[in-house]
Image (spheres, rainbow, N blue to C red):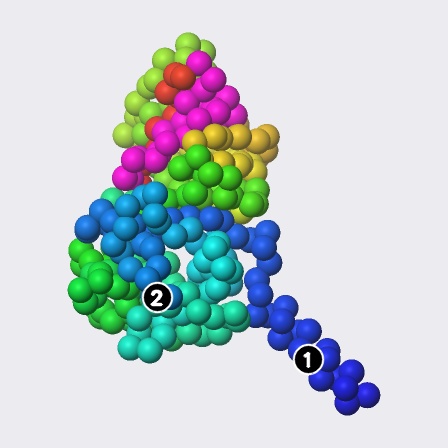
Amino acid sequence: MKRMIVLAAAMIAAAVSFPSQSSAETVYLKSAHSGLFVGTSNGRLAANVSADRAAAFDILDMDSQRIAFRTVNGGRYVRAGDGAFLESASQNVRTSETFYLSRLPGGTYAIRSALNGKLVRAGVGRGSLLAAVSVGKPQAWERFEIIPASASGQSGNRRPGVSHAITGVWKVKQVAAHQTGYLTDLAPHLFAASRVEIQSGGNLNAMVGCNRMNATVSQNGASWNGGRFMSTKILCRDRAAAAVERSFTKAAQDAVRVALSGNRLTLRNSAGDLVLVMVR
């Protein structure tokens, strides 16, 4: 009986230590300041390589706030190790292997260690090592770009959903009119009231007129699938708002290509026409 209890405890610990493979997205990390990618040097992470030598990492969602990084080559988890230097050395996920990811203006990110609460900085020491040593607000060396491997022509995205890079809340700036297909600016009051939230699992929730809409979307690099939209059935007395709703739904469903440039997200249809522009 005691042996069975120990075995069960070990199985539970393994389940906790190894997040589901289906929750992973493969990415590259790049220093926004130096423009160099993150690779590994003697097990430590350093922002000192070109794109063709960059290390690929799986990002795993641990809970609603924390993430873990796992190297694709070797399957080791990144930890804030000795001296808070980031190392790809762990087989299990504990506090030292978890991080908080914060989106910054310009489409960059800050990475904060859950172990010591400090920001990860690139460019530490002569080797441009990564270490969780910075306090206060993120400055130049604490800003990173997260680039989906699928956007680089590699099949790294293993799950339905979207890249972390496009998740969050957006406002609709322009949409192709459903009657004509011409790209049209939203009226100021409709732009201010618009809200489109894209979640990492692919859930899209939108309010761009009078009704709440939702859909399950998917993205693989530059490819986009808008899914099927569902909506509440509130009568829109504002004809402009009603038109924007119809146009937004059609644009999101017709789109097949997606692109992100800083804080601007664009969707194009199969003809290459721009059908939706969102900003944050």
In the current view of this chain or complex, which residue is farthest to the right? 1
Viewport quadrant of the C terminus: top left
**Within the image, what quadrant is residue 152 found in?**
top left
The label nearer to you, 1 versus 2, is 2
Mark 1 residue element? helix
Q: Residue at x 43, y 43 (%)?
A: 149
Inspect the magenta stretch and tell me whether residue 256 lies in it: yes
Foreground: 274 or 214?
274
Give the vertical position of 42 relative to 165 (above or below). Answer: below
Taking the image as shown, residue 198 lies to the left or right of residue 278, namely right
Label 1, on which residue? 9
* Front residue of 82 and 222: 82
Q: Which residues are magenta?
A: 243-271
Q: Is residue 175 visible?
A: yes
Q: What amino acid does circle 1 point to?
A: Ala
Where's residue 105, x and y in %? 25, 48
First in sequence: mark 1 vs mark 2: 1
The quadrant of the image that shows the N terminus is: bottom right
The image quadrant that residue 239 belongs to is top left
C-alpha separation, residue under disc 1 versus residue under disc 2:
34 Å
Q: Residue 193: image x %, image y %? A: 36, 37
Q: Look at mark 2 in the image and give the residue it sits on.
A: 42
